[in-house]
Image: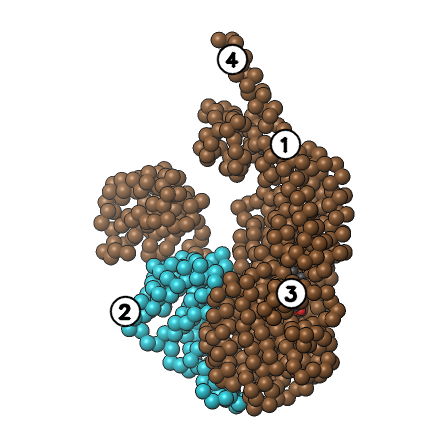
């Protein structure tokens, strides 16, 4: 890989914004499974596996699945955040494989938030 | 959910709901539905545990998603007629208004989220920690570019000094000043180190940052390196943090591949490489001089200062060591400036602080709050109050180096200067909430056991002092306390603080001093009355049933693992003291407050009384 210059840094920033912020990437949803130590201990890997399985079964290409660190609310792990295009992200709590499968079907595919498992909508305040 | 039915009733068949009568309710429903000829329209399903056991028996009605709670067979005829026949949900049996059930709360309405401000944790849960590009997309490495290409070391130091940022590793030393001291020391080779040892029991702030956002640590270190003129960096992480190590290593590899570490970074002519060093997980290795010895491959033990590390640190070269969270604050500070940084917090404690909120609160987690927020807000609004309806007793800040803060000081703002006034410290961010089922002498004993174990043994005041202090606490909690012990403890604490070589010994007595300060009565009752009123120290506790309050419900007898409790239904029960192992189960179970905690000697008295009664019975017969 070539050494970066400041311009490259800016280019990466612009390019990548679209691949992970939905807008320009042509994606309609992004699912983030929170995989910090607390999440993994509570079963986040199984949740991720179930999700990948669901994606493969349905042959989905326009949804980003990614992992990230601790969401901060450790007593509610495993957690995942579902962000649909043009909607506030929704955080789901106390997940297991069955629950994420339902969330995938009802929220990501069906467009309806699964209230029973949802913790909160929106993003935290930064800065 | 099956189709063909107009309504689906999901009745909970979890153990909790069955115990509270859900099968009877199901039966009543079946009968009533048949009576009304609704079996073909209404489907009845017994589900697994719903988790709302306290509200049981519960039932969810689909498609509306209406949630009924505490159902009784008597309710069913009305329910079936009103809801399933006439379509009018029965409000009085509902858990919540149906509208509320379907509107998801938003973050700005929930204190756990809306009182937090994310700076150090701004990428937590947002970026994929294994993709450098996502970090870059969130303005990552922009601050590094700015300092490398546009700023002199002096300008960086000025900005950091003006921001008021203080080290987040525990001592709260001003970061800009530390950098300035090292910058002024001449030297070809200098080191920049990151402290990711995180040895406080119960703390996980730094681990989360390293796992969730490893690049921010690297970027903070690049900026620090430029400020002091370092060309080599090490991140000291305990080996018990495998995920943090793995993600940091990946981040380092990616940064090297992009030329963000190595030679001539971003074409600026500045060189820096960073490596990870895995520590074996000793508390003392978090202390700066011990950490440096450990990094050198020696046994991790502190050395006297001066010389300070800024002058002679790692391999006797000028060195700066900062904490993970300190570094995580640096990039946004550089991008937005000192005034922005100061916009949160107080005059002397600027910015935000990350806390690992644990213990007896409802919401456990990693939180970041503006400095100056009152403790009460953190515990009751963010933490959601005390768990299981218990009462707040104290909050422990600063781990084994810190202290406890009682109820009447809960309005203390979280700043370095205010917390120190209470006898605790802000520390690295461990915040453990303690409820009234805890004994404060035992809390102090727990921390002293930890520091006694972790003392490296180099200096006698710490090695022997912590051991003697711990032994004394063991004596007190096991009934061997003597008048004068409190004063003796205080004296000894002073000696250990004054004579120890490093921060470990200098702060280890704090948990004792602060519990004596606020909970002296507990020490006194342990020593003089041989009575642990919280019922934690077993030799100083006797559980007994107060016959006046006991309703004879038998709940205590059912939970007793020793079958030590007996009594007729609706008559006062009694504990057979010879069988009782003081496990507290009965105490925690009784809803009427009929279980009492008496002093240790009461046990003997009760046993004698019971034997006497028995004898009399034999004589009479
Ligand atoms: C016994 C002991 C343990 C310590 N453990 C840590 C630790 O785990 N992490 C940390 O950052 N600082 C720890 N410190 C504080 C460090 O010595 C040092 O002050 C700190 O890393 C400096 O960084 P800062 O100025 O950014 O806070 C410890 C100090 C003592 C005395």
> Which chain is indicated by disc 1?
B
Q: Position of residue B484 (x, y in %)?
A: 76, 39
| Residue topped by disc 4 | B617
Q: Nearer the viewer, mark 3 or mark 1?
A: 3
Front: mark 2 or 3: 3
Residue B401 visible? The answer is: no
Labels 1 and 4 in the same subunit: yes
Name the disc covering residue B599, or none: 1
Q: Quadrant of the N terminus of chain B?
A: bottom left
Element assignment for label 1: loop
Task: Please report contact status of discs 3 and 1: CB closer than 8 Å, yes or no.
Answer: no
Q: Is residue B317 left or right of residue A119?
A: right
Please name which of the two marks, 2 or 1, marks the residue nearer to the observer: 1
| Measured Cα–Cα span from mark 2 to mark 1 | 65 Å
The Cα–Cα distance between marks 1 and 4, rounded to whole angstroms, is 28 Å
Going from N to C along the chain, the mark reached first, 3 or 4, is 3
User: Hue of chain B?
Assistant: brown
On the image, the x and y values in percent for residue B93 come to 41, 45
* Cα distance between the residues tagged 2 and 3: 54 Å
The label on residue B516 is none
Residue B214 location (% of width, % of height):
52, 73
Which chain letter matches label 4? Answer: B
- Contact, mark 2 vs mark 4 (Cβ under 8 Å): no
Residue A75 horizontal side relative to residue B185, left or right: left
Marks 2/4: CA distance? Answer: 76 Å
Please give the name of the residue rendered at 61% of the width and 27% of the height, measured from the top-left corner.
Answer: B602
Which of these two is toward me, B534 or B23? B534
Q: Is residue B126 above or below residue B283?
A: below
Q: According to the image, label 3 marks what residue?
A: B290
Residue, disc 2: A57
């Amino acid at each position: 890989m070539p050494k970066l210059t400041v311009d490259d840094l800016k280019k990466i920033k612009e390019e990548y914004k679209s691949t992970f912020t939905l807008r320009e990437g042509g994606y309609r949803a992004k699912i983030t499974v929170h995989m910090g130590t607390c999440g993994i201990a509570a079963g986040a890997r199984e949740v991720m596996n179930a999700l990948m399985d669901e994606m493969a079964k349905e042959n989905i290409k326009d949804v980003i699945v990614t992992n990230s660190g601790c969401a901060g609310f450790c007593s509610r792990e495993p957690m995942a955040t579902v962000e649909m295009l043009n909607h506030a992200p929704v955080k789901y709590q106390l997940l297991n494989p069955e629950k994420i499968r339902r969330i995938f079907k009802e929220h990501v595919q069906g467009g309806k938030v699964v209230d029973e498992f949802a913790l909160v909508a929106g993003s935290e305040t930064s800065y | 959910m099956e189709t063909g039915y107009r309504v689906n009733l999901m009745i909970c068949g979890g153990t909790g709901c069955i115990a509270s009568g859900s099968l009877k309710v199901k039966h009543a429903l079946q009968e009533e539905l048949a009576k009304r000829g609704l079996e073909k329209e209404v489907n009845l399903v017994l589900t697994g545990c719903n988790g709302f056991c306290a509200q049981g028996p519960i039932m969810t009605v689909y498609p509306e998603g209406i949630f009924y709670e505490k159902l009784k067979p008597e309710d069913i005829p009305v329910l079936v007629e009103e809801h399933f026949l006439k379509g009018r949900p029965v409000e009085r049996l509902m858990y919540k208004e149906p509208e509320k059930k379907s509107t998801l709360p938003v973050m700005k309405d929930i204190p756990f989220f809306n009182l937090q401000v994310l700076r150090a944790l701004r990428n937590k849960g947002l970026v994929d920690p294994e993709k450098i590009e996502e970090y870059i997309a969130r303005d990552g490495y922009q601050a590094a570019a700015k300092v490398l290409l546009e700023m002199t070391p002096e300008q960086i130091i000025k900005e950091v000094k003006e921001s008021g940022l203080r080290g987040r590793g525990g001592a709260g030393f001003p970061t800009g000043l530390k950098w300035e001291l090292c910058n002024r020391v001449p030297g070809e080779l200098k080191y920049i180190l990151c402290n990711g040892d995180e040895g406080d029991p119960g703390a996980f702030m730094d681990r989360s940052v390293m796992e969730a956002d490893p690049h921010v640590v690297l970027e903070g270190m690049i900026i620090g390196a430029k400020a002091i003129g370092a060309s080599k960096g090490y991140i000291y992480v305990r080996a018990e943090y495998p995920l943090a190590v793995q993600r940091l290593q990946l981040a380092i590899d990616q940064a090297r591949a992009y030329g963000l570490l190595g030679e001539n970074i971003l074409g600026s002519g500045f060189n820096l490489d960073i490596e990870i060093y895995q520590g074996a997980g000793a508390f003392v290795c978090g202390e700066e001089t011990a950490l440096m010895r450990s990094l050198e491959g020696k046994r991790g033990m502190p050395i006297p200062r001066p010389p300070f590390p800024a002058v002679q640190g790692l391999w006797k070269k000028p060195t700066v060591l900062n904490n993970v969270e300190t570094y995580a604050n640096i990039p946004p500070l550089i991008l937005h400036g000192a005034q922005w940084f100061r916009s949160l917090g107080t005059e002397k404690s600027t910015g935000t602080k990350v806390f690992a909120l644990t213990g007896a609160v409802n919401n456990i987690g990693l939180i970041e709050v503006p400095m100056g927020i009152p403790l009460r807000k953190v515990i009751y609004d963010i933490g959601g109050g005390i768990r299981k309806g218990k009462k707040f007793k104290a909050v422990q800040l600063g781990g084994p180096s810190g202290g406890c803060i009682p109820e009447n000081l809960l309005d203390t703002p979280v700043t370095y200067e205010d917390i120190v006034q209470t006898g605790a410290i802000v520390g690295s961010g461990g915040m453990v909430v303690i409820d009234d089922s805890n004994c404060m002498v035992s809390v102090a004993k727990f921390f002293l056991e930890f520091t006694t174990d972790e003392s490296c043994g180099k200096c006698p005041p710490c090695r022997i002092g912590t051991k003697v202090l711990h032994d004394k606490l063991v004596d007190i909690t096991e009934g061997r306390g003597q008048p004068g012990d409190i004063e003796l403890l205080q004296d000894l604490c002073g000696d250990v603080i004054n004579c120890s070589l490093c921060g470990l010994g200098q702060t280890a007595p704090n948990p004792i001093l602060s519990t004596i300060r606020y909970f002296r009565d507990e020490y006194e009752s342990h020593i003089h009355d041989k009575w642990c009123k919280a019922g934690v120290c077993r030799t100083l506790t006797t559980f007994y049933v107060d016959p006046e309050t006991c309703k004879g419900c038998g709940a205590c007898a059912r939970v007793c693992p020793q079958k030590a409790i007996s009594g007729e239904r609706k008559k006062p029960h009694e504990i057979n003291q010879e069988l009782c192992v003081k496990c507290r189960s009965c105490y925690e179970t009784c809803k009427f407050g009929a279980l009492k905690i008496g002093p240790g000697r009461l046990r003997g008295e009760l046993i004698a009384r019971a034997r006497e009664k028995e004898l009399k019975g034999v004589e009479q017969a």
